[in-house]
Amino acid sequence: MAETIVNLVLGKLADVLVNEVLHLYSVNDQVEKVSRELKRIQAFLKDADRKQIKDERQKHWVKEVRDIAHSIEDVIDTFLMDIPQNPQNPQKSCLCATIKNMIRNPKTLPAVHNLVNETKQILEKMKEIEESRVRYGINNLGEGSTGDIQLPVRPTVLPDIDPDIIGFKADQNSIVNELLDETTMRRSVVSICGIGGLGKTTLARKVYNRNDVKGQFDVRIWIAVSEKFEIIDVSKKILLRIKQQFDSSIKLSDLPNETEEILIEILNSLRGKKYLIVLDDVWKIDLWTQIREVFPDEKKGSRILVTTRFADVPKGMDPSSEPYMLQGLTDELSRELLLKTVFPNHDPIKSCFDDLSDIIGQFVHKCGGLPLALVVLGGFLSKKPRNHAVWSNVFLTMSWHAEGKNCSEIIGTSYEDLPLALKLCFMYFSAFPEDYDIDAESLLRMWIAEGFIPQEDNRTLKETTESFLEDLVQRSIIQVDSRSKDGSIKTLRIHDLLRDLALEKAKEENFLLVYSNPDDKMSLSRARRVAIHNPDCNQLIMSPNLHTLLCFHEGSMPNCSKQRLLKVVSIGVKEENTIELGMFVGLTQLRYLNLKGMVSDNRNQEFFEKVIGRMKFLQTLEVCMLKTIDGYYFEFPKSAWNIKTLRHVYDNPLVLPASVKLTNLQTIGWVKPAQSWEIELPHLPNLRSLELDARSSPSKAVVLFLSTLEHLTNLDIWHDDSVLGILLDMRGFPFYNHLQSLQLYYTSTTKLTQLLHEDMLPCHLIYLKIENHMFQQDIMPVLEKLRCLKVLILAGAFESQKTTCSSEGFSQLEVLKLYSLSMEEWEIEEGAMPILKQLEIRYCHELGVPQGLQYLTNLQKLQWPEVGNSKANLVRNLCQHVPSIDLGKY
């Protein structure tokens, strides 16, 4: 694994070698020698990595290599920080500026002097490492890395495998029957018990989200517990989730701070209500003994649903309740799941070549019916050639410690098979709390800011990063939770067993440390990346070489003003955390800064401007709703518009000056056009995603600005009558053939006289939302010809009394949502919307039962809460083939 760290450092060394300052001071040869020696050492790492588990000497040698690589990285970063640089290319300094700076800035000469001294010490240490390698008998077997980062081939975006759809249907029904059993009205515990990787959490989540369960409980909350827990944290989560079901504005800071007060309030909040509380991954009975009294037993049929690996836990919680012992999949179902993972786009039975049948059977037998083992193994095999010799070799090289007892061998093998750069990305998942919904967009931008993603000639960094993420999904190492409107991954999560592996590797490599309890404090002084899960962090002393600080707690942030090498700072909580703006003064190397929803101790806008303006290499800046303790909201810092490296900017609202010229900017949120746009337009040639508030704005300026955006793929726009005609006909815009997502929000109450014609809207749209456009025509015949459209949302969008979806219309549509439409009749011809999966109808009070509803044979989910009792039975009869139907109380 040290080979991965060495690869990252070698990439930095290659960049530094093009720096004119090194040539100017004749230290280029010295740095080049460090690079050569590091490459020599790297050639022996694979042999050492293979032996280190068994041989402590090799293990010690690998640690020394890793430490020296980290030292080199710190020397490079410190040097680059102390010399003048070109923000467009931080590795290339400006020679003229350097010479001038020698006179004006006393830091330049000491920086070069320190580089000379540090590299001399590093070379001495590397000499010792080379000598110890010979003593330890570590040999280059010709299998070392070439030094180049191994890139994953960009995978095709594949349908996400949902392991619970294979098997477990009977288990779902059994658990639901227990939850809804009216013969047991007392509060009772329903438990799902089984070993890790068996699918307990997946099964519980499916049950929790079923419509027939949702409608039976006044309160439903899900709490992830895990092995290490603090009762005050768990109780706060429970109380917060209960209160937020009735008032979404409630925040953690609104809750009491004393455990006893919290427990009393939970009890009072649940009295008189029928509730379902899910406690996921309970390890010890101690939790129940401390909180059981807060769950009232009022004979209303309330339930506690528990998942656990230990049979004694449910018995200790409710001796009268028998735990549901989850069994593994049968060999037949295991084979089906494995093959669906290996051959996701094909019929698994037809895809099974005869010569692979026997080896597949051996894999299935060894996996012991564990869904996690099967999908991870399937993801691993999907990257291998489909021939018997290769698969047999995979089978023979695995240790297979105990059949059906665990899947650690499969998980470990899948990790070792990752390309080097992907190992860094995988270890990054150790930062996130258990059962955490990870925002994919933020994660990808952090990977780029960290320097994990190599630049390729034939695609952008964003495209490469997305391919890395999809590769991990294809290998079943991470799980997709939801996808965005354009099909890209929106949120994801990682199984706790895979997260455990990421934690183990990250700690072993000194890659990242999670601070979750006081015992972790001692390690912070040397940690290069820190993820904080504990609010008690004000007095933490962290390494001066800290590169990343991620916070997943509520409360104050630790002071990081002395961590000058920080590149990533992010707050991963929804609550308002308190920060000191002053601690960011020296953090000039930041690439990623997320202060969304933070509370500042300083109200000085001018000071905020100066702090942000010094971050010359910032790529992502998110300061939405940044405010002071007294409720004052900061304006977006004008100094940020001088940061040439900016790629993604978020604030609300945000005024974009006409003078802005940012060639790297790709995403900008909630822009309000400036009056100066009428004279001069912002220059954002590579903008991909734009949220534009064009209400009461100069229409000519708005149209001219949109006419400069050739590469725009996502556009959300709030508008009034002034630009309506232009927006309904986008054929004149340069992004017409590129736009994939369009959301139009009309803010006028007047009816539209314009007609929407075919070809007015971009033909490659995947996602379309039209809100409050009161068309006096049936626009379905126009929209159904958008051949790429997958998601359509119409909200108060037309007044036609009747609409028709023709037999060849909406050929690719998967999701259709209709809100507040005044239509009365809807005819669906046979063959229309052939692959529609989700249909949602809300507040369409005049709408009768659609004619042809039965023709939607691929429909998986139907929601029509206000359907009315007179129509509900007919809808059910027409949609007997639909697995999930929500007709409200009817």
Image (cartoon, helix red, strand yellow):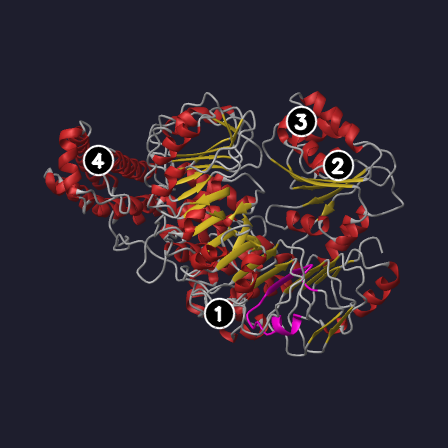
Reading the image, the residue beneath label 1 is 731
Q: Nearer the viewer, mark 1 or mark 4?
A: 1
Give the label on residue 255, or none: 3
Viewed as shown, does residue 1 lie left or right of 514?
Answer: left
Q: Amino acid at mark 1?
A: Arg
Viewed as shown, does residue 100 lie left or right of 332?
Answer: left
* Residue 645 counted in the magenta span: no
Reading the image, the residue beneath label 2 is 315
Mark 1 touches mark 4? (CB < 8 Å)? no
Q: Nearer the viewer, mark 1 or mark 3?
A: 1
For the residues marked 3 and 4, what is the alpha-carbon distance in whole angstroms?
A: 49 Å
Mark 3 touches mark 4? (CB < 8 Å)? no
Mark 1 touches mark 3? (CB < 8 Å)? no
Reading the image, the residue beneath label 4 is 83
Residue 215, percent from left and from top:
80, 49
Q: Nearer the viewer, mark 2 or mark 4?
A: 4
Which sits earlier in the primary sequence, circle 3 or circle 4?
Answer: 4
Q: Nearer the viewer, mark 2 or mark 1?
A: 1
Is disc 2 placed on a helix, strand or loop? helix
Residue 816, percent from left and from top:
66, 63
Q: Is residue 243 above or below residue 478?
A: above
Mark 2 touches mark 1? (CB < 8 Å)? no
**Picture residue at 40% right of the left edge, 29% below the top:** 606
Q: Amino acid at mark 4?
A: Ile
Residue nearest the observer in this picture, 702 or 275:
702
Viewed as shown, does residue 194 lie left or right of 570?
Answer: right
